[in-house]
Amino acid sequence: QVQLVESGGGLVQPGGSLRLSCAASGFIFRIYTMGWYRQAPGKQRDLVADITFGGSTNYAESVKGRFTISRDNAKNTVYLQMNSLKPEDTAVYYCTTRVRGEGYWGKGTLVTVSS
């Protein structure tokens, strides 16, 4: 079955960096778009970035120029490099994909940006 497992979250100071990873299994990773969403306390879950099977990327305006999404098809892993982090980036970050019309989510990893 499809499984998505996020890692790499934690506590970081404003201006710092983190790299999130999402290890995928149970489907042909290389042919599907992968995405990262985030959900802050009391807010809806919003798209952060996504990447197609061909490597085309799309970013939320709030993270453009600071975050970079990438994928390693040999490792079935998608990454989110987050630089110049701000307190408003604090959220649970989720990895997601849609396989044969059905959406799948990981359990999320918490990112806290605070001094």
Image (cartoon, grey):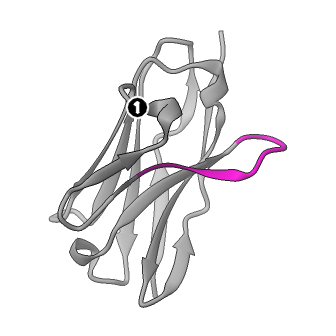
The residue that mark 1 highlights is: 64
Q: Is residue 18 above or below residue 80?
A: above
Q: Position of residue 99 (x, y in %)?
A: 42, 83
Q: In which image quadrant can residue 97 be found?
A: bottom left
Q: Is residue 104 left or right of residue 79?
A: right
Using the image as rendered, state which of residue 63 and residue 112 is in the foreground: 63
Q: Residue at x 52, y 31 (%)?
A: 62
Q: Position of residue 64 (x, y in %)?
A: 40, 31
Using the image as rendered, state which of residue 19 and residue 47 is in the foreground: 47
Q: Residue at x 48, y 53 (%)?
A: 36
Q: Residue at x 35, y 26 (%)?
A: 65
Q: Residues within 10 Å of mark 1 (few under 14, many from 20)?
A: few
Q: Residue at x 33, y 83 (%)?
A: 27
Query: What kind of residue is marked 1?
Result: Lys
Q: Which residues are magenta?
A: 40-49
Number of numbered discs overlaid on the protein picture: 1
- Judged from the image, the secondary structure of the residue bearing numbered disc 1 is loop
User: Which residue lies most toward the right here?
Assistant: 42
Q: Position of residue 49 (x, y in %)?
A: 43, 48
Q: Is residue 86 above or below residue 100?
A: above
Q: Is residue 64 left or right of residue 114?
A: left
Q: Position of residue 11 (x, y in %)?
A: 59, 25
Judge whether residue 41 is colored magenta: yes
